Amino acid sequence: MNPTHRKQHDVLGIGVVAVDDLIYVEEYPPAEHKVRVLGRRRQCGGLTGTALVAAARLGARAGYIGTLGPDDELSQIVRRTFTAEGIDLAHCVVRPDARPYHSTIIVARRPPSRTIFSHVDGRAGADPGRPDAAVIRSAAVLLVDHHAVEGTRRAVEVARAAGVAVVADFERYPDSATGFDELLRRVDHLVLPERFALELTGAGSPKDAASRLWTPEREAVVVTSGPQGCWYCDARTATDPRHLPAPTVDVVDTTGCGDVFHGAYCAALAEGHDLDRRVRFATAAAAIKATEEGGQSGIPRRAVVDRFLGGWNM
Ligand SMILES: Nc1ncnc2c1ncn2[C@@H]1O[C@H](COP(=O)(O)OP(=O)(O)OP(=O)(O)O)[C@@H](O)[C@H]1O
Ligand SMILES: [Mg+2]
């Protein structure tokens, strides 16, 4: 990408943000058990929220253009966090009925697992008609997720018409799936977790899923498979997707690894890197995150990822 043509924003996110209450336990219990809590932590999360924090820490000029409430506690927590991370909120849409998701996440040490209980007390994610199209066009990359399909589709159409790259993280079918197939079709960088990629395609493996998700309308497809790394393809490799294994690290907490992968992918895309480099960068950032507790607190900064990449022999 020619630096003289840099857009005002590298990455704008329009999906969902959340406030996560993380509860750490030794083992996830069966029903009717009483369990000692090893630790608690409250932090911001959500697919788009965590990805934007990752993009910002990795050097991208990031902004949030989804919705928040005017003065409720959860929205204020998100505002404070984003402001501290340098994420631009100037074009965030304020609606009286908008709220972040509120999640309680149980992180068990043995065997390592995460169980997420999530709800929203209002509307979350993209507004159907805002922000202005000019704001969306001011970005190099638009990051979307599977919430609020109507507003997300509108933003994607504006972005595609202006040549803004669209990166999507869809983890499941939206609650109201109307228009989702069309949204899925219009994404040019589809980066999906294995479970949903297999469900969508009926494929028997992440490699096959990546291949089946490819269409000539896309720039890239990536299927992430946790500790197995990811399979990815573009026009040249659509019939034989490549595999990048995740590096072996001392795993402490994988909360948010997928979101960090997306944020890092977006940051590298905004910098103009090719698919191999984007995927390597995202894989390194997500692996480092897995070595730290917490969804957002463990997200590495740019220098840490660059150092890791320098010493990573695959
Ligand atoms: N245990 C791990 N060790 C190293 N890297 C990991 C590990 N778990 C996840 N990752 C990295 O994070 C990427 C995304 O993880 P995953 O496929 O689990 O996404 P996800 O299911 O969307 O997770 P999330 O719930 O965090 O969004 C993987 O492709 C990999 O690069
Ligand atoms: Mg995910």
Image (tube, helix red, strand yellow):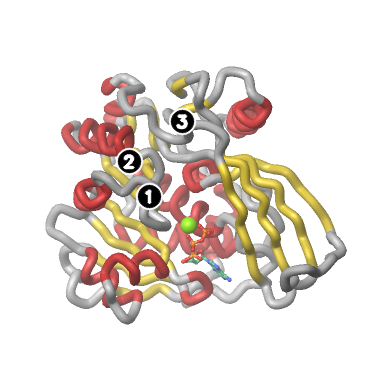
Measure the alpha-carbon separation of dots 3 and 1.
23 Å
Q: Residue 50 placed where, x, y %?
A: 54, 45
What residue type is disc 3 on? Gly
Q: Are marks 2 and 3 in contact (CB under 8 Å)?
A: no
Ligand 2 under 8 Å from disc 3 Cβ: no
Residue at 49%, 20% in the rendered image: 94
Q: Are marks 3 and 1 in contact (CB under 8 Å)?
A: no
SS assignment at label 2: helix
Residue at 30%, 65% in the rendered image: 200
What residue type is disc 2 on? Val
Q: Are marks 1 and 2 in contact (CB under 8 Å)?
A: yes
Residue located beneath label 1 in the image: 174
Question: In the shown orientation, is residue 40 left or right of residue 162?
Answer: right
Outermost residue, front direction? 32
Mark number for residue 149?
2
Residue at 16%, 60% in the rendered image: 215
Name the residue nearer the viewer: 311 or 85.
Answer: 85
